[in-house]
């Protein structure tokens, strides 16, 4: 069978076979792995997506050698992953200098926001000083590790794509796309520390402890982001959340 025949067969197999979709119970915090789903199966979940993205990675590549750049990437991604998992978030995707976390179940919005604010604090107070100490060239060149996070909530279809041994879990819905777009926002206060942005739906589901700090609203907004021909409202925050 030639490549053309294989591609046609794969299209027929993928599109021609109806997908069996099940809905996950909102009370559980589990998120399936790709191997947990068949290639014609999907799972519908109510989820909060967090994308956290390292800023100016191109500047890093121009400043540091390959080994130092790899150490920086690893430090950022490993710390972000550790924080997300500590709050029952599930890592299902890495994209270069960006990591995606999925939160489901009770208080999913609170846990995603706390993760983002933990990451901001850890990057500023732990990771960056360690990098400047171990890799003086970064400090000498004025390069500082910085990040942005985007968070959005909504019903999302999880499905398995690819081939056995080379497949992944994909997320289809507004929430993952909006979270990714929010993490890509540049300017709009980023230089002043407004690096966490959340969709209006996420904000509406936050508990008071995740909206207010000593009686002051941690969130500034609303602002508007255009995506797919529609406008979405979001809030931004310059706050961090310490941990011990």
Image (cartoon, helix red, strand yellow):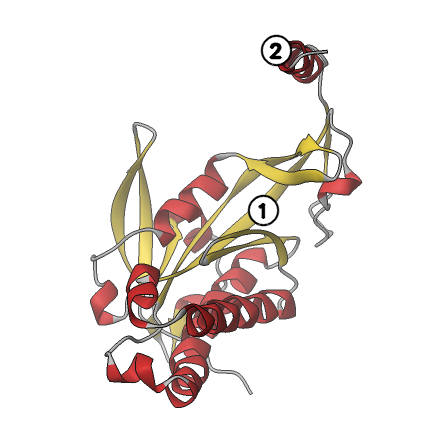
Residue 142 is left or right of residue 130, and the answer is: left
- Quarter of the image with the C terminus is bottom right
When the figure is inspected, residue 152 is found, relative to residue 41, above or below; the finding is: below
Which residue is located at x 47 percent, y 54 percent?
96
Q: Position of residue 70 (x, y in %)?
A: 48, 68
**Closer to viewer: mark 1 or mark 2:** 2
Residue 200 is left or right of residue 105, and the answer is: left
Q: Residues within 10 Å of mark 1 (few under 14, many from 20)?
A: many
Q: Position of residue 186 (x, y in %)?
A: 25, 55
**Residue 209 in sight here:** no
Q: Position of residue 27 (x, y in %)?
A: 72, 51
Q: Residue furthest bottom?
A: 133
Q: Which mark is residue 47?
A: 1
Q: Position of residue 225 (x, y in %)?
A: 28, 42
**Secondary structure under the numbered disc 2 in the rendered image:** helix
Look at mark 2 in the image and give the residue it sits on.
4
The answer to whether the residue labelled 1 contacts the one labelled 2, judged by CB atoms less than 8 Å apart, is no
């Amino acid at each position: 069978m030639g490549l053309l025949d294989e591609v046609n067969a794969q299209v027929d197999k993928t599109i021609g076979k109806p997908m069996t979709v099940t809905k996950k119970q909102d009370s559980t915090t589990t998120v399936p792995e790709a191997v947990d789903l068949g290639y014609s199966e999907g799972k519908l979940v109510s989820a909060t997506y967090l994308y956290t993205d390292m800023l100016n990675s191109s500047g890093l590549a121009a400043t540091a050698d390959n080994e130092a750049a790899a150490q920086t990437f690893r430090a950022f991604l490993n710390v972000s992953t550790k924080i997300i998992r500590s709050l029952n978030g599930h890592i299902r995707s890495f994209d270069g200098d960006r990591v995606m976390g999925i939160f489901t179940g009770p208080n999913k919005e609170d846990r995603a926001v706390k993760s983002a604010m933990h990451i901001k604090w850890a990057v500023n107070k732990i990771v960056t000083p360690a990098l400047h100490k171990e890799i003086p060239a970064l400090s000498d060149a004025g390069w500082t590790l910085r990040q942005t996070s985007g968070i959005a909530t909504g019903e999302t279809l999880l499905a398995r794509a690819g081939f056995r041994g080379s497949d992944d879990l994909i997320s289809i819905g507004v929430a993952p796309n909006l979270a990714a777009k929010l993490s890509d926002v540049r300017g709009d206060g980023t230089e002043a520390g407004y690096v966490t942005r959340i969709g209006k739906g996420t904000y509406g589901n936050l508990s008071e402890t995740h909206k207010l700090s000593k009686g002051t609203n941690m969130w500034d907004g609303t602002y508007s982001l255009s995506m797919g021909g529609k406008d979405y409202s979001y809030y931004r925050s310059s706050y961090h959340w310490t941990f011990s």
